[in-house]
Each structure stands twice: as C-alpha cells, then as structure tokens.
C-alpha cells in the first residue's frame, strides 16, 4: 500500500517522514528539520505534519522523539499552547441576527491583547483585580510553582496568577462556531502566557550555557539540549509539565467565563454537556514508540492516538475541524495543529490591506483593522489540502465555521 507521507533521507541524519503531499513545504523549514535530524538524541525518525513551516527554535509542525534528552527551544516559550472546544445545545436559529453583542460580551469576560511595552504601561491582557475563581484555581497550581521557584527564583518574576484565565495575542483567539448541523460551539486557543514564556526563555538559555560548558558544537544553537542526569534536566521537565497544566487550566477558566458570557446573551438558556475537547499542541510527553521510552516533543502538533479527540483550527475566516485520532504509529500518533502559515506576519502586513481582511472575513463578527492583517486567511495554507494530506492520521467528526472571532 502506498504511504501517505514523503520520506526524506540523508546520510548521518535521522529519516524525516513528512505528511506534506499537496501542501507547500518551504526550503527553510526543511533545512531546519535536517538540522534537528542530525542530532544524535533523535529516536527512530522525525514526523512532519502538513502545516509545517519554519519556526523559532524548531520547525512548527514537527514531532521529535528523543531519548535521554530534551531540546527546550523545540518546545519553545508558549509551553502547553493548545485548543479547547465545547459543543452547546444551541442551534444557529437561537442566535441573535446581530452578533456584535456576543463579541462584546466575550471581550469583556476575558482579558486579551498585547502587554504594554513601555515601563509602567498597563497590561490590558492581564487581570488587575484577580477574580475569586482564578484565585481559587491558582491555589491548585501554587505549591508546585513555589517549589520550582525555590530552585530558580528568576521564574517567579513573571506574569503568573494575573495571566491565568487570559488569552494573549497573535494567533490566539476565542470563537463562536457552527457545525454542519448548525449546532453552536465555543472554541478557543491559548497557552501558558507570561509564566510559560519565562520558563521557556530561562531554560533555553541554560541549555545553551550547558552546550558551551561542554564544548558541544551544534548545527544551530537553538537546538541546545539538556541531557537526562544533567544539572537542569529534571528541573526543566518539572517546570514544563507544570506549565502544561497551567495552560490547560488557563483554557478551562476562559471557557467557563465565555460560556457564562454567552448565557447572558441568550435568553432561552442552553447546556454544554455534549462534547468538550482540551488538547495541547506545543508540549513534551513521556511515551513509548518503536520499542523505546522517549520524550515526544510536539511543536505545533496534536496527539492523535486511536480514538483520541483533537482540534485542528483553520485560519480566521476558514473552517476548523474536531477530529478523532487514527493512531498512526509512523506519525507517533500525531496530527497537525492547524493550517500552518505560508508567509510571515511581517510579509502579510506588507502584502495585504484592510480591505482584503474585510473581504476574507465576510460573515464573521470580528476585528477587521490593520492590527490583525497578519492573521488574514491568505497568510495560511489551504486547510482542506492540509486535511487531505493527513487523512491517514485523523478522521473528521465535526466541521466548524466561525461566526464570531475575538483576537488579542
């Protein structure tokens, strides 16, 4: 039977298996992947998802299994970034004709946006009076966080409590969507916010210093790694696993607040018991593949074990998918985390204008100004081609189309 992936082999490097048939695969991303494949810590091969594109540290859309070591920059600084989606009992006919009120309610319920850059500037993406719910949920995370900070005090100087239950900016979003049966869903995308950024940045630098101390030459210093048994390995894994739990809790709180905000806008009432999915797509997981226990780093990839539910969002104005994993061992039971960019944010802002953004997001209640042009659908790959390229990794359970989108 013909495989659905391309095999890229090169002497002295691990094999790369790429689910990229029919989708763009930039040369710079391949170059970056070849650098990772040259690392001796890679186990078996590297799996590449169809949303692959060049990233900072490591290639986005890559699945890297490693034995006895981890690469902090491969996980990156948005540790535990991922998606949550909840199906409601509402139907499209129960929504108001004008959705601006729902968008405003979402924006009021969840802090979002860019941190103030200037000294003393107010961070509109953080809590300034922490709600009781957030304070209570923080208590479940605080003891482990304090233990991490005792060993690494620099991590405490971060936005931690005041970012819990907040969205951030960039490609993070909150959406109201309709599926093919006109059922209403709430879906959002966010991660570990300021504290995850601090943890990632801190350990990436420690890994680089370890390489220098041991005079280890790398094809790219972003691939600096921490070996099991070394001074910082256990501390990093502990901090990453904590940040992943923080990220999942962050999404849970936002979803709770989004549902509460929607209830105030819908007089008929509704429930949300039918289906909920909460999955990471930037994280480390301890797993066993091809006969070895290893650390699997999914950088812009979702775990898709047989029967496991996942979320693959399209771009702003495109379709998204609730999927069920097929458990393909060659991909280390993984699938893509979205459509994947075909141009950088800077390039998108140069190429497209506000009128293009308005046209591309027709029918969606969302921001349509110059500040969000970098998220225009044209800057992303065709989500339908991305889904076709990974048909042996997942099956589609629901197809969603957003009608409200909140961006930071």
Image (tube, grey):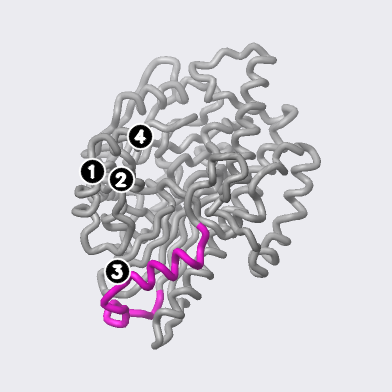
Q: Which residue is mark 2?
A: 373
- The residue under label 1 is 353
Check residue 92 for magenta coloring: yes
Task: Estimate the x, y position of residue 342 in percent, counting from the top left.
Answer: 28, 37
Magenta region? 88-111
- Residue 341, visible in the rendered structure: yes
SS label for mark 3: strand
| Camera-nearest residue between 216 and 104 | 104
Residue at image location 44% in from the left, 59% down from the top = 188
Residue to which mark 4 is pinned: 53
- Any magenta on residue 355? no
Q: Is residue 183 left or right of residue 13?
A: left
Is 136 placed left or right of 296 in the picture? right
**Distance Cα–Cα, label 4 vs label 3:** 28 Å
Q: CA distance from mark 2 to mark 3?
A: 26 Å
Give me the C-alpha separation between circle 4 and circle 1.
23 Å
The alpha-carbon separation of the residues under discs 3 and 1 comes to 30 Å
Residue position for label 3: 179
Disc 2 to disc 1, C-alpha distance: 7 Å
Q: Residues within 10 Å of mark 2 (few under 14, many from 20)?
A: many
331 lies left or right of 95? right
The answer to the question of whether label 4 and label 1 lie on touching residues, with beta carbons closer than 8 A, is: no
Circles 2, 1 touching at the beta carbon (< 8 Å):
yes
Mark 4 / mark 1, whichever is N-terminal = 4
């Amino acid at each position: 039977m013909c495989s659905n992936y391309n095999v890229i082999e090169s002497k002295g490097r691990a094999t790369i298996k790429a689910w990229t048939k029919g989708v763009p695969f930039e040369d710079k991303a391949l170059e970056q992947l070849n650098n990772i494949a040259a690392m001796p810590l890679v186990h078996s091969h590297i799996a590449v998802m169809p949303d692959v594109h060049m990233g900072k540290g490591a290639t986005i859309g890559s699945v890297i299994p490693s034995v006895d070591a981890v690469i902090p920059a491969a996980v990156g600084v948005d540790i535990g970034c991922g998606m949550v989606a909840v199906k409601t009992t509402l139907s499209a006919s129960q929504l108001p004709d004008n959705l601006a009120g729902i968008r405003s309610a979402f924006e009021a319920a969840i802090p979002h946006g860019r941190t103030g850059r200037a000294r003393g500037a107010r961070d509109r993406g953080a809590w300034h009076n922490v709600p009781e719910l957030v304070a209570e949920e923080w208590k479940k995370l605080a003891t482990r966080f304090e233990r991490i900070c005792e060993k690494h005090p620099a991590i405490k100087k971060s936005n931690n409590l005041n970012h819990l239950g907040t969205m951030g900016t960039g490609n993070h979003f909150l959406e109201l969507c309709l599926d093919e049966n006109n059922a209403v869903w709430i879906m959002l995308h966010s991660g570990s916010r300021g504290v995850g950024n601090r943890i990632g940045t801190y350990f990436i630098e420690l890994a680089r210093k370890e390489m220098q101390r041991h005079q280890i030459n790398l094809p790219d210093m972003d691939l600096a790694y921490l070996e099991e048994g070394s001074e910082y390995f256990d501390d990093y894994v502990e901090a990453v696993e904590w940040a992943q739990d923080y990220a999942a809790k962050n999404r849970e709180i936002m979803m709770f607040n989004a549902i509460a905000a929607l209830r105030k806008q819908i007089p008929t009432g509704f429930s949300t018991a039918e289906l909920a999915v909460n999955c990471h797509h930037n994280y480390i997981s301890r797993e066993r593949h091809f006969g070895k226990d290893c650390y699997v780093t999914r950088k812009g990839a979702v775990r898709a074990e047989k029967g496991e539910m996942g979320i693959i969002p399209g771009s702003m104005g495109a379709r998204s998918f609730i999927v069920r994993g097929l458990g393909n061992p060659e991909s280390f039971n993984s699938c893509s985390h979205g459509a994947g960019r075909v141009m950088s944010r800077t390039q998108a802002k140069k190429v497209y204008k506000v009128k293009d953004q308005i046209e591309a997001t027709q029918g969606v209640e969302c921001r349509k100004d110059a500040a969000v042009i970098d998220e225009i659908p044209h800057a992303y790959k065709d989500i339908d081609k991305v889904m076709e390229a990974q048909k042996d990794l997942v099956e589609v359970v629901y197809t969603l189309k957003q009608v409200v989108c909140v961006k930071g």
